[in-house]
Amino acid sequence: MINLRQWQKEALTKAINWLVKEKESKHFLINAAPGAGKTIAACAIAKQLIDSGEIDRVVVIAPRTEVVSQWAEDFNFTTQRFMGKVTGRDEGLDSTHMDFCVTWAAVKSMAKSMESLCLAQRVLVICDEHHHAAVQAAWGAGAGSAFAFAKYYLILTGTPIRSDGEDSLWLAYDDSGAIQQPEAGSYTLTYGQAVDLEYCRPVTFHRHDGIFNVDLEGGESVNVSGDRPANLEAGLKRIPGLQAALNFYRLSCTPQYEKDGLTPLLDGYQGTMLQCASEKLDELRMRMPNAGGLVIAPNIQMAEYMAEVLELIENEKPVLVHSDLPNADSKIKAFRNSSQRWLVSVAMVSEGVDIRRLRVLAYLPNALTELAFRQAIGRVVRSASPEDDTRAYVLMPSFETFDMYATRVENEMSPGKRKHPAAPTTKKCPICSEECEKGALSCHFCEHEFHTTNPRIKTCSSCGNANSLSASECHACGQSFVTAFTISLEEAMRDGAIVRGMSIDEADVLISESIAPGIRRKVLSSNDQALVKLLRTLPDESWGVLKNIMNAT
């Protein structure tokens, strides 16, 4: 019998009462912070419905293939029933006697089969990361048709407001865009509550500041920082795209190189940001020896660049996953079960991906929504064990939008959990868990030899005192360490891509990178050879252009 957390027991009782005893509606909502244990709670509810004879089958809809695999493992662990992982190419599912899990993207092509299944058997549909199911979107429409005749719907979310304002399938919304579900038909556990109950780790945000000195033509320059936008003269304002190019966040996502144009600049914005992240991971590994870090990059170019920077800093190659690389899910799974330090990702490690040893997040995303922000935070706050005493750390540009999101997350935590703790004075042996002196070379109990790292410090130019690499000001004299980064106008204006003779602007490149993986999966699963040939002919970067053309027709 699985030992449920107290909130999971309460959610189980409440769900059974709402769905079975009171029969108020077929929908029950669990709105719990990422990392709090929604999957196990849902599996426990499913087991109760199975054991009481209320349902015959369970179908889970999850956002990604990696999450589908995690669902299958957790479902089997909780219910002792096998859960199959199916795709849009699988047939005969309406006559199966198997529980199964499928991605949101695959549901549309399975609508007829799922409708027949729900008519023939009593089905519980578990909707994971429900914000994917916008009523007007293809995924939501597909699920609405496929599961119209399900007996029960268990809806899971940790971010119950869609950033695009669209209503989601099966639930009503109020005027502010928040889910409107009767209190008796839902269970809510906020991030702050999850931290206080020690289901999730508290998070500290490090706002990585800097001043960009952008050299313009004629010897002029302009300064841009997180709290000071570019102040352009009247003549410069008329230059097309200049104001947009000098946006602080965009400059934060611009790779910087040495004079050779090939070697990443370690003293640049991203270099200093990742050096601070690396130092923080060193510190965390004193308490959690296998702690890992995650870099979320805005695009493939920046992901590859930041992976290079990390390799230069640490002399260890990070794991890199993005849509142009094969076997991403296998690489993520391998990273989860290893002690490698860093995983660098573009839209591959998001909602539902469970890597409990992740503790440091370097955040430079493409999507600037609060939904994406909270989902990213959820990757590094999961408690690894009852003995886990670590804290999660997020390094992000000192950017007004992120500051606002971070403040909201911080305000959910109790004052005691918000307080930033002092650096650890001891370290934990990874073999016997004995507490040892911070500078010890080996464990005094089991004689395990500790891995040593060179201290990462920076010297104050004013007083000469040594400081932590992540310090924002000198501990001795208060001198600010906010750094000025020089960048050329050409670098700031660098925009888009030239692929196979096609010139594509940056906006279309970003759209392409977000939609290309889904298009590729759909085309390959269709077995339409004409479309497959077209897919192989056109570069991924062109799909955003085609999408705009199609929307305009």
Image (cartoon, grey):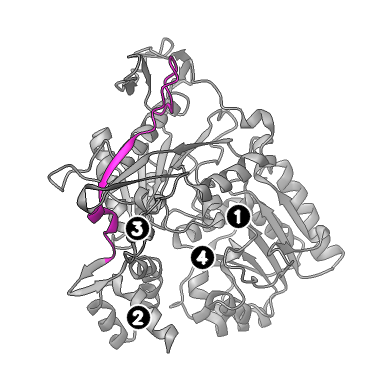
Compared to residue 49, the image places residue 12 above or below, namely above
Q: Earlier in the sequence, mark 2 or mark 1?
A: 1
Q: Are marks 2 and 1 in contact (CB under 8 Å)?
A: no
The percent position of residue 342, horizontal first and vertical second, equals 35, 41
Question: Which secondary structure lies at badge 4?
Answer: strand
Question: What number is the disc on residue 80?
Answer: 1
Choose mark 3 or mark 2, whichever is in front. Answer: 3
- Give the quadrant of the C terminus: bottom left
Q: Residue at x 27, y 35 (%)?
A: 267
The percent position of residue 126, horizontal first and vertical second, equals 63, 64
Q: In the visual, does 46 lie left or right of 233?
A: right
Magenta part of the protein: which range? 470-496
The percent position of residue 178, horizontal first and vertical second, equals 70, 62
Q: What whole-number distance in Å separates the C-alpha atoms at marks 1 and 4?
A: 13 Å
Q: Earlier in the sequence, mark 3 or mark 4?
A: 4
Q: How packed is label 4: few (under 14 Cα within 10 Å), some, or many (20 or more)? A: some
Residue 523's quadrant in the figure? bottom left
Q: Is residue 36 magenta?
A: no
Residue type at numbered disc 4: Gly
Q: Nearer the viewer, residue 454 or 467?
A: 467
Residue type at numbered disc 1: Gln
Q: Is residue 480 magenta?
A: yes
Q: Which residue is mark 4?
A: 84
Residue type at numbered disc 2: Leu
Question: Which secondary structure lies at badge 2?
Answer: helix
Q: Which residue is mark 3?
A: 245
Residue 539's quadrant in the figure? bottom left
Choose mark 2 or mark 4, whichever is in front. Answer: 2
Compared to residue 389, the image places residue 100 above or below, namely below
